């Protein structure tokens, strides 16, 4: 029976990683499009982050109702969120950090061209690995560290082609952009591992309920971000200034993306999640062949090959470990 369960888990894990890859590819194209297209009214990014949190809360509540049946819904909500302030407080840290990170994402996207932003945001691969070693006590072998490095180089090569095309206007400050990305990567690694630790800990609280608990902090925090950063603008023009179909679609898709990350952390882990998003970058770049007439270069092909190699290297390091430890095997 355990073998059957293991097989089902592996299938589930693979399905989620494939889904996250596809989800993220579309997400990248959508965000690029929503921010870069020529429109008279550009939406306020802090409002987009806030509305994403609301959409996630609604989706999570629906999942809790589905899992618990409508009749038990309020009693579970009461017993697991309202009557357990200590347990709810546990998710305060990742919730706050994710709010800051989601806002930094838009700051970075406004100061760096999308390609440069995506390359530098791959630093997440290392911050996540380091936090999983420190906080979860995981150990990665030499071949896996090499795999992470190969992944980073691969994604950078894939993106280097498009980064030359970026247009930097005068109001863009690369220093602000890079600082935002670096801080966001550290926050992403830390929050992801912290959430994984809570989720895989002993308390029998479902993934959806954990996200409802996160919303308790994330919604007010993202609303404060709207008021502090864009308060005057929102008071003058309204919250939904510039919100057309594409922006709503981006906000909705961002919400689905966040919850896909949560499911991935539960069934796989944060490092596997980074591999999925790296492959997504590859697919998104290929997607722009079709959408924006992008022609892949030799560098792109080499980078793509490295990304694929790194996945094999990370998930099945045994044959490679022999190569790395050949000196030991000789004596
Ligand atoms: O890029 P990274 O994987 O760090 O992004 C995490 C994203 O997933 C954030 O937008 C965060 O708000 C979302 N998330 C979530 N629920 C979780 C974990 C992450 O909505 N439980």
Image (cartoon, helix red, strand yellow):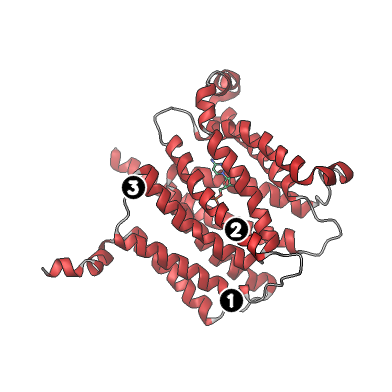
Does 4 sit left or right of 34 as displayed? left
Q: Which quadrant, please, contains the C terminus? A: bottom left
- Residue under the image location 33 percent in, 47 percent down: 138
Q: Residue 223's quadrant in the figure?
A: top right
Does 329 sit left or right of 184 as displayed? left
**Mark closer to the chain start, 1 or 2:** 1
**Mark closer to the chain start, 2 or 3:** 3
Relative vertical location of residue 294 with respect to residue 319 in this rendering, above or below: below
- The secondary element bearing badge 2 is classed as helix
The numbered dot on residue 37 is none
**Residue count near mark 2 (Cα–Cα under 10 Å), binned few <14, some 14–19, many ≥20:** some
x, y percentage for residue 117? 61, 63
CA–CA distance in space, label 3 to label 1: 35 Å
CA–CA distance in space, label 1 to label 2: 23 Å
- Residue under the image location 62 percent in, 73 percent down: 163
Relative vertical location of residue 208 with respect to residue 297 in this rendering, above or below: above
Q: Which quadrant, please, contains the N terminus? A: top left
Residue occupied by mark 3? 138
- Residue under the image location 48 percent in, 28 percent down: 205
- The secondary element bearing badge 1 is classed as helix
**Mark closer to the chain start, 3 or 1:** 3
**Residue count near mark 1 (Cα–Cα under 10 Å), binned few <14, some 14–19, many ≥20:** some
Which of these two is toward me, 79 or 325?
325
Find the residue positioned furthest to the bottom: 298
The numbered dot on residue 179 is 2
Q: Are marks 2 and 3 in contact (CB under 8 Å)?
A: no
Residue occupied by mark 1? 161
Q: Are marks 3 and 1 in contact (CB under 8 Å)?
A: no
CA–CA distance in space, label 2 to label 3: 28 Å
- Residue under the image location 70 percent in, 52 percent down: 250
x, y percentage for residue 25? 59, 60
């Amino acid at each position: 029976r355990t073998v059957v369960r293991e097989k089902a888990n592996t299938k589930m894990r693979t399905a989620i990683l494939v889904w996250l890859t596809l989800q993220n590819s579309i997400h990248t194209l959508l965000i690029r499009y929503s921010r870069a297209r020529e429109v008279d009214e550009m939406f306020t990014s802090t409002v987009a982050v806030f509305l994403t949190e609301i959409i996630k809360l609604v989706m999570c509540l629906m999942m809790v109702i589905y899992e618990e049946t409508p009749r038990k819904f309020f009693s579970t909500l009461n017993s697991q969120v309202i009557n357990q302030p200590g347990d709810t407080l546990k998710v305060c840290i990742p919730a706050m950090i994710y709010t800051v990170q989601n806002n930094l994402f838009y700051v970075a996207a406004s100061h760096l061209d999308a390609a440069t932003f995506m390359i530098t945001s791959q630093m997440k691969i290392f911050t996540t690995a380091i936090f999983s070693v420190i906080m979860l006590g995981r150990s990665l072998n030499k071949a896996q560290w090499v795999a992470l490095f190969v992944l980073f180089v691969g994604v950078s090569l894939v993106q280097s082609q498009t980064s030359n095309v970026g247009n930097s206007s005068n109001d863009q400050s690369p220093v602000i952009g890079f600082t935002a990305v670096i801080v966001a990567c550290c926050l992403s690694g830390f929050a992801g591992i912290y959430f994984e630790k809570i989720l895989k800990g002993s308390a029998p609280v479902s993934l959806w309920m954990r996200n409802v608990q996160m919303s308790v902090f994330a919604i007010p925090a993202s609303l404060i971000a709207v008021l502090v950063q864009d308060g005057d603008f929102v008071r003058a023009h309204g919250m939904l200034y510039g919100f057309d179909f594409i922006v709503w679609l981006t906000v909705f898709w961002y919400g689905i993306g966040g919850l896909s990350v949560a499911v991935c952390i539960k069934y796989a882990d944060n490092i596997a999640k980074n591999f999925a998003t790296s492959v997504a970058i590859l697919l998104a770049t290929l997607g722009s062949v079709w959408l924006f007439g992008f022609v892949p270069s030799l560098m792109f092909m080499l980078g793509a090959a490295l990304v694929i190699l790194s996945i094999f290297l990370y998930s099945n390091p045994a044959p490679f470990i022999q190569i790395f430890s050949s000196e030991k095997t000789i004596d």
